[in-house]
Amino acid sequence: MPDGWRKMGVLVFYDLPVVSPEQRLAAVRFHKFLLADGFERMHYSIYARYCGSMERAATYERRVEQALPAVGHVNLLKLTDRQMVGMRKWIRGNYRAPENAEFVPPAQYQLF
């Protein structure tokens, strides 16, 4: 198998209810779990993490599954390195990122 197909990234998409205080707390805990586990926020409820291998992607899949809130929709998509390279990002006009969306560099980088 070519090397570009072995390296993996993980995308997590979620839609969690925030009607009751308990649901809001569960949503905040899940959000904080993703950030603490090394995921980067791509959009409001979309987080990505580059894993480096299929085995590590499976590990993060299990970790996300263990942290799932009791109620809500959570989707996880594993992509190969070649598929992630095809991702494009456009920001047009006078767009400003939300003030609380600061980039926080990871504590450790993975070299390939």
Image (cartoon, rainbow, N blue to C red):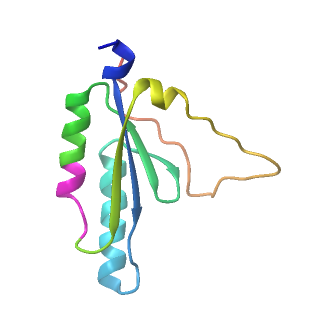
Q: Is residue 58 left or right of residue 13?
A: left
- Residue 66 located within the stretch drawn in magenta: yes
Is residue 85 visible in the rendered structure shown here?
yes
Q: 106 above or below 76?
A: above
Q: Is residue 81 left or right of residue 70?
A: right
Going by the picture, which residue comes out furthest to the right? 93
Residue at 37% x, 77% y is 24
Indicate whether 55 appears above or below 75.
above
Residue 111 position, x and y percent, is: 36, 17
**Image location (x, y in percent) of residue 87:** 56, 34
Residue 112 visible? The answer is: no
Residue sitting at x 30%, y 65%: 29
Q: Hey, which quadrant is residue 9 in on the image?
A: top left
Q: Which residues are magenta?
A: 63-69
| Residue at the bottom extreme of this rendering | 20
Q: Is residue 58 left or right of residue 73?
A: left
Any magenta on residue 14?
no
Q: Which residue shows up at 48% across the image and 41% down it? A: 104
The image shows residue 33, relative to residue 52, as above or below, that is below
